[in-house]
Amino acid sequence: MNDRTTQSRSARIKLHGPADFEGMRKAGRMTADALDLIAPLVKPGVTTDELDNFVVQYARDHKAIPATLNYRGYTKSSCTSVNHVVCHGIPGPAPLREGDIVNIDITLIVDGWYGDSSRMYQVGEVSRKAERLVHIFSASSDLESFAFFISISIW
């Protein structure tokens, strides 16, 4: 790497201050709140399109923008991955069924800051295996968030 490349790269690094971090926290909180509020809607017979419509309305009501909406032609405001779909499933008209598990991924833009999070939900009564998967996913997400928080705090 030559001096010119080093200068060019370091010139692009922006250091954020307290107001910036508050903006990041606000976006993250709003996304987490959306995931909390969508939980009672996750039940048998509800379509992932209906869940996506909730995200659109929530964003509008809170003056946020769903980051995925119209991103490179994507027409949804969330990603919903049901059962064997690993990630970034596309909401659609198929209803959720008793025993399904669904991961809902939401990214909201609030005042220019992105809050991106997902959560896994059980649809009605699920098998012991699915329940365990949801528990492990939740625990690993908590650890990941904690590790990220610690790295930001130390840095």
Image (cartoon, rainbow, N blue to C red):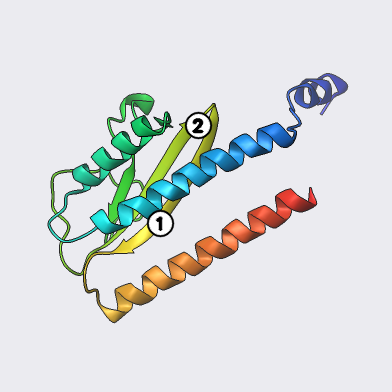
* Relative to 134, 47 lies left or right: left
Residue 70 versus residue 154 in the image, above or below: above
Query: Disc 2 marks which amino acid?
Result: Val
Q: Tags 1 and 2 in contact by the CB under 8 Å rule?
A: no
Q: Earlier in the sequence, mark 1 or mark 2?
A: 2
Residue 81 versus residue 98 in the image, above or below: above
**What residue is at 13 percent from the left and 50 percent from the top?**
94
Residue 111: mark:
none
**What residue is at 73 percent from the left and 36 percent from the top?**
18
**Secondary structure state at the residue bearing disc 2:** strand
Numbered label tally? 2
**Residue 58 image position (x, y, % from top left):** 34, 38
Residue 23 versus residue 118 in the image, above or below: above
Q: Within 10 Å of the Cα at label 2, are there few (<14), some (14-19), or many (20+) other Cα atoms?
A: many
Where, quadrant-wise, is the N terminus in this rendering? top right
Q: Residue furthest right?
A: 3
Please state which of residues 46 and 7 is positioned toward the viewer in this rendering. Answer: 46
* Relative to 145, 134 lies left or right: left
Q: Which residue is mark 2?
A: 110
**What residue is at 32 percent from the left and 57 percent from the top?**
39
**Residue 56 image position (x, y, % from top left):** 30, 35
**Residue 126 image position (x, y, % from top left):** 24, 74
Front disc: 1 or 2: 2
Q: Residue furthest front?
A: 61
**Residue 98 image position (x, y, % from top left):** 16, 67
Residue 119: mark:
1
Residue 106 in sight = yes
Residue 87 in sight = no
Query: Disc 1 marks which amino acid?
Result: Arg
* Relative to 47, 17 lies left or right: right
**Secondary structure state at the residue bearing disc 1:** strand
Q: Quadrant of residue 84?
A: bottom left
